[in-house]
Image (tube, coloured by chain):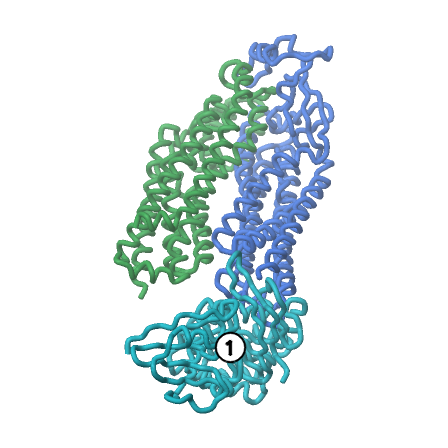
Amino acid sequence: MVWMTWRQHRWEVALGLAVLVAFGGGVLLLTLLGWHLMGQIAGACPSTTPNPAASIAACADSTAEYQNGFQVGWQWVLIVGTAIPALAGVFVGAPLVARELEKGTHLVAWSQSVPRRRWFLARVGLVAGGAAAGAALLAAIGQGWFAMQRGTGDGLGGPSLWAGFEIGPPVVIAYVLFALALGVAMGAAIRRTVPAMAATLVGFVVVTVAVGGFARPHYLAPLTSRQSILGSFSSLVPSGSAPTSGPGFNLSSDWLVNLGIGNYTNAAGHPVSDATVNELLGQCNIPNDGGATTCPAAANGITQLLSYQPASRFWLFQGIEAAIFLVLAGALLALAYRLVMRLR
Amino acid sequence: MTWLTWRQHRGEAAAILAALVVLGVAVLLLTVDGSGILTTISRGCASGVCEGTAGNPAQWFESGLENDWTLVLVAVIALPAVFGVFVGAPMIARELEHGTHLVAWSQGVTRHRWFVSRVTLVALGSVVGGAILAALAQGWFAMQADLGNTGSLPIWSGFDIAPPVVIAYTLFALALGAAAGAAFRRTVPAMVVTLVAYIAVRVSVVQAIRWRYLAPITVRWPIKGQVNSVTSPGPSAWQLSSGTPFVDAAGHPLKTAYVNRLITQCPAPTASCVNSLSRVYMTYQYQPASRFWLFQGIEAAIFVLLALALLTLAYRLVMRIR
Amino acid sequence: MTSAISTTALAKRYGRQWALRDCSLEVPEGRITALVGPNGAGKTTLLKLAMGLLAPSYGEIEVLGRSPQREPALVLARVGYVAQERPLYPRFTVSDTLRMGREMNSRWDDAGTRERLVKRGIPLDRQVRRLSGGEQAQLSLALALGKRPDLLLLDEPASSLDPLARRALLTELVDAVAADGTTVLLSSHLIADVERVCDHLVILSRGRVQLAGDIDTLREEHQMIVGPRMDPTAAAADPTVVSARHAERESALIVRRAGGLAPGGWRTEALSLEDLVLAYLENPIAGSRVPVPAAEVGS
């Protein structure tokens, strides 16, 4: 079965490798560009200077360029890293069974000496193994990128660990296996290649978005932090002031789950209405030249309750989400197995 | 031919309609969800400009809704590609692969008419679908833009989801699929090629070609010894990234390190310092917001022309199948 | 004589349609048996049931003493199968196809299979989709024979082949099994092929076995007799009459009786296998033998 599986999937292997190489190459390019820009920043942002005001602008420029360029680069890495599992499911998983059935070649495959059960287990097992290896490679590339970002981007707003949740290794591998299993199941159920591919794409997107959006913030009950409504979500300023965070909550590394808007309390612990808060905030004076904002004194004691997941929980959450998707993958493969065995 | 085309594509049409409905509902929900926060913010913004380094509600809004924005953006950008891959590629490839083209071409309709009718009808459908998609995206975007000059959602950031280009992308994807299908005659390979080619072309255009449609406006001003906060063309312009922001009077780039050295050598603005620094200018390039729709037209025209070329290619390939 | 395939009241239903119904037959070992019948008779269903590709709705089937459902590995290793329309992987080369056979069968005669194909002039490095219909049929047969099966199931192996290719295929088949004594069950609706190649016959119609037996024996048992016109209902009521045709002045009957001379006033006429088969197909048993009005034929 090993040769047979290889022979039937060799183009997919080649393409998959090509995609990974391209992805890795792209990441490498971005990394090199990053080092170049970091060099510029180092030149423009000396730690001490006799004329700090003058150099700040040059520093600000280089920093802004780094940030802008890298925001975009970072988003693309994330999008591609999430798209690849979907593609694996659509282009490898869905045709696996559906194509044999559509072309009638299952009659050839299932009338050799390999019983149908073994055919399914061997074929799917080998393909899943290959896919998992590819996923590991993908995750390694993503992690390499990440490490570079966080290592050199200190204080410059490199993405927090949470921002790269979808390409953390456990999750990526689980996504790929889930997409594959979904594809095989759709192929066995629908028995036609193109509809199975479409169903796989839709199913993958729906499930990952639903889990990521609704389930993930609640794997563990989020921690809460009481923050002044005047508080400190400053956009990260370049050298000089470090980003401020509230009690317990670290903006640059924790995952803000809920802003707590609408959930205001005053210093005495009594709830404050939205209307009051809006009015007070409306009286704030935010000067245009970047100077300090002044707000009415009454706003000082009012806090909002935000909820967050701390960075320390990142790997735990990775494990939970990976487990969820692996269980889903297992269930889908079992379903596909039943469907294939029952095609009589 | 109309009935036949409909009959062969009705499954896909239903699926696409369902997808658009789902997207519309999602956008609606996000709009409703967002408007509550919007009210909070609009009252909290002092002078209409909700920027600044103090904690401010606009950023709370952004961080909360940024994920949604990315989702919508990704969905709208991805859908034309999905359309090309799942509708355009199988349209011809599937017939050829399964041999059903022999049935279709031995009826009373000539091969020429079969191709033209089929493609035209599906293209019309795709234009309609693209228009609906763009309308949904515009609704979402308008709501975002109402927020004022937040700086993170200027008009240019919505370039890929404005109606002219979305419709053009959809047609292009369809044509690409048809050409790949006619060339490769097998469904799955045609789908793969369509996807890869679509991404390659779109990314190249966005990264390397789009900013060149018209020569960007260059702004230059001397730093005069004291580098002030950079005057910016405003968040509505599309600022192009430049290597170094420093140039000399003739426009040649100056290394940042060099400028830095000049600055650090001048702890106080003496006459000689001012002199040496007077040679330094800052510069950047941008495309103003006023050119937005012009660029839309240019990019749409490019992709429509590409689509026509690809359809012609597909036609020639199909006619040559003997 | 032992049976390669033995079925007992075998039935298969798809939804509400019966593809096979109350099918009890024995396919003898070592013989080439033809399974004939019109389209939709259940031939493909029966072959797939024997191969374990389908599961029976009712009844039992035993292949080489094993159940294809419960012991698939044992059955698959000893039974070769060529499906209707002879599916193959179109982009595999001939070599790849043989490699597949080698990889997926524990017992595989690589040299012999290659030799068989080379003898037929089939290039090993050509893609399957570029072979002619006849060559693809030879390849399908070679693939099934490669595992040295004890039983070979062929579903309309010669369909849509030109006469030359058909003859080549059947010759190949006969040669291949002659030496090994492989049991063959092949379905066909081309009686000429059946006559040339087979020695045992099963007639299947509307999901039921109409007739089964050794071809020579069946021929001896049946006669076509022609005589003066007789009463159609009398002919229909006679259990030995398989089919009857009544013209204005004559009746032609196909009867099943143990040889002997025709009754007085009647003469015997040549009965081809095709006539015999058609007779049974035109008058199928539905449940019990229901008299069917004989067709009026203008002479």
Q: Position of residue A137 (x, y in %)?
A: 62, 53
Q: Quadrant of residue C180?
A: bottom right
| Residue A246 location, quadrant | top right
The residue most toward the bottom is C261
Task: From the top left corner, tell me how far across and down residue B259 is, in percent.
Answer: 52, 33
**Is residue C126 visible in this depiction of the protein?**
no
Q: Position of residue C75 (x, y in %)?
A: 64, 73
Between A73 and C132, the one nearer to me in the picture: C132
Colour of chain A in the image: blue
The amino acid marked with disc number 1 is Leu
C248 on left or right of A31 = left
Q: Residue furthest top?
A: A297
- The chain letter of the green chain reads B
- Point 56% across, 31% down: residue: A59
* Residue B99 shown left or right of residue A123 in the figure: left
When the figure is inspected, residue B147 is found, relative to residue B170, above or below; the finding is above
Q: Which chain is cyan?
A: C
Q: Secondary structure at mark 1?
A: strand
Q: How many marks?
A: 1
The residue at which mark 1 appears reads as C211
Q: Nearer the viewer, residue A321 or B211?
A: A321
Q: Looking at the image, which is closer to me, C51 or A331?
A: C51
Quarter holding the C terminus of chain A? bottom right
Classify the position of the N terminus of chain A by image quarter.
bottom right
Please provide percent x and percent y for residue C17: 50, 59
What chain is tagged by disc 1? C
Position of residue C160 relative to residue A341, above or below, is below
Residue C188 appearing in the image:
yes
Packing grade of label 1 (10 A; few <14, some 14-19, many >=20) is some
